[in-house]
Image (tube, coloured by chain):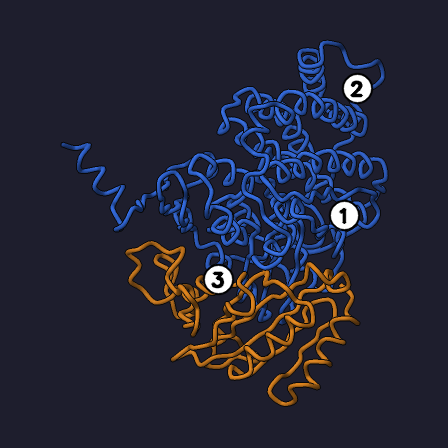
Chain colours: A orange, B blue
Amino acid sequence: MTWEKLKEVLDNVSKRFGDSVSAVMEEGKIAKLVVEAGKLVEVAEHLRDLGFDHVKAVTGIDLVKLRKGGGNLIEVSYQLGSYTVEELRDSVLNLSVKVDRDNPQSPSLYKVWPSVEYHEREVYEMLGVKFQGHPDLRRLLLPEYWMDIPPLRKDYKVPGRD
Amino acid sequence: MVVEETRKIDVYDVGGPELRFSYGPQHPGTGHFRMIVTLRGDTIVDVEPDPGFVHRGEEKMAEYKGWITNIPHLERPVILDSTGITLPYCLAVEKLMGVEPPERAKYLRTIIAELDRIGSHLYWFGLYGVFLGHTTMFLWCFSDREYLVDLAQLISGARITHAYIVPGGVRNDAPKKVPRGLVREFKHYYKAMMGREPDEGELSEDFGKYVKAVCDFMEARLQQYWDMFFDSEIFIERTRGIGVLRKEDAVRLGAVGTTLRASGIKADTRIDDPYDAYPYLKFEIPVRTEGDCYARAMVGFEEIRQSLNIIRQAVEQMPEGPVKNKQHPIVLKVPPGEAVARAEAARGEMLYYIVSDGGPRPYRVKISPPSFRLLPVLKHLARGIRVADLPPVYWSLNYWPVEADR
């Protein structure tokens, strides 16, 4: 990955959106923009205009048991990539938003990137995050008779394990 | 009466001239998967993919296993391309640990990854063939694949699901010699398929020479595949101009792998974000611009040739030396942090997002498999085609339900 290019993007976004975003960059590991939920769509649109044209994955992380930097939060992280802009092909940018764990709600980015459709559905199912504005927010992978809490939450008890 | 009742469940009237029915979830050669198809006459109005029949909870399971013991279960979703799914995991863990594998291990990883890619593509074409009514392709692909799988076994110890790659290297070195029985068997098969004995000196018990002989044989067979299947009416009639994915749609829907490259985008993680021994090797990325079912198969077909090239080069250039860093065999110390890593699996880009909190187990392992990213593409392509074209469209995507469901 060319980290200089990613750094440029992070600087660009930080400059434009000021305090509502914070950039995390650990060279060789991860480049991440943590955004306030209210600004998510705006930042996403800006990143799309910079050339990030598709979403590779949407990762939901329950932070409640994380020893360092945890809290009563769920982090929703979009892994962005680019096919059309040659210089960005080698980079993955994480656009992340932290939502309240007791009432997790976040705006859907379906209108910005249609490729998030199934990824967001999966996060909804596995962590219970409600994506506002998603056209078809239904369960996806789990069996229809699933009655427990979303299984990727840290307080979910795996039968026979805990 | 029983028939009547079954029909009531499977096919139902949705009002107007349309009919909605369930396509699946039987096992059509790839794993259980259902499409809910809405049909008007012979034309598909809408397809709603319904994955999840083979969901195993791999991501949750990964939070309960150690960094190394995660590897054998993570490769279950894609048993044919197990390197494709474990390699990015190991790359991500290596990033977190801040280590690099030894040079020789990088080459061995590349060889086994390409062997798996060819094996997976042959499986794809075998089943693609049989579903289009071409049984010979199925038999040919499967019998040829056998010798590549044997090669993988020689290196890793297992035919499929090798669990060969570990963070910090590979499990063991490749052998210097090939068992005499295997060489004899291959010679016999060579004669049966090619109608002649392999050239003197071409085939021997030396590992490098044997690998080269198998690759040369496979390349010669590709020409026969072309004559028999890819250039045949059965295949062309059912795939050319069917299920066209335009370049803009491929980008918009986030397509991956052969599907993306058949729509005119030259994107491949091996080139874009190179890892292991790929920066040292010369190979082409096959690209087509038509975006139809035929082009998608052609890209895969050409990829086999390139993979053979890579294996031949890697075996020749592979340096001597250790194959694994000095580390504890089971317990790894992974510092807290998060890392994203990706690799080009047989079906496309496989991405991992791993969070560590410094404990003996990962805090979170997110897998983004290529098949899952093809779901919107499948939905898009199926709209407006005839119901008889659904199998070619489905098979051309090389969608693997088990991989998508994890």
Amino acid tagged 2: Leu
Secondary-structure class at tag 1: helix
Residue at 51 percent of width and 81 percent of height: A37
The N terminus of chain A lies in which quarter of the figure? Answer: bottom right
> Looking at the image, do the residues carrying marks 1 and 2 touch, with CB atoms under 8 Å apart?
no
Establish whether labels 1 and 2 are both on one chain: yes
Query: For the residue carrying disc 2, how many other residues have a C-alpha within 10 Å: few (<14), some (14-19), or many (20+)?
Result: many
Amino acid tagged 3: Glu
Query: In this picture, is B90 found above or below B218?
Result: below
Q: Which mark is residue B203?
A: 2
Mark-to-mark CA distance, 1 and 3:
36 Å
Query: In this picture, is B128 found above or below B203?
Result: below
> Looking at the image, do the residues carrying marks 1 and 3 touch, with CB atoms under 8 Å apart?
no
Chain label for disc 2: B
- Foreground: disc 1 or disc 3: 3
Secondary-structure class at tag 2: loop
Query: For the residue carrying disc 1, how many other residues have a C-alpha within 10 Å: few (<14), some (14-19), or many (20+)?
Result: many
Amino acid tagged 1: Lys
Mark-to-mark CA distance, 1 and 2:
26 Å
Query: Residue B96 appears in which quarter of the rendering?
Result: bottom right
Mark-to-mark CA distance, 3 and 2:
52 Å
| Direction from residue B46 to residue B332 in the image, left or right | right
The C terminus of chain A lies in which quarter of the figure? Answer: bottom left
Position of residue A143 measured from the top left corner of the image (x, y, whole percent): 33, 54
Position of residue A107 measured from the top left corner of the image (x, y, whole percent): 47, 76
Position of residue B370 measured from the top left corner of the image (x, y, whole percent): 57, 51
Q: Which mark is residue A117?
A: 3
Query: For the residue carrying disc 3, how many other residues have a C-alpha within 10 Å: few (<14), some (14-19), or many (20+)?
Result: many
Q: Provide the residue designation for mark 1.
A: B106
Q: Nearest the camera: B119 or B46? A: B46
Chain label for disc 1: B
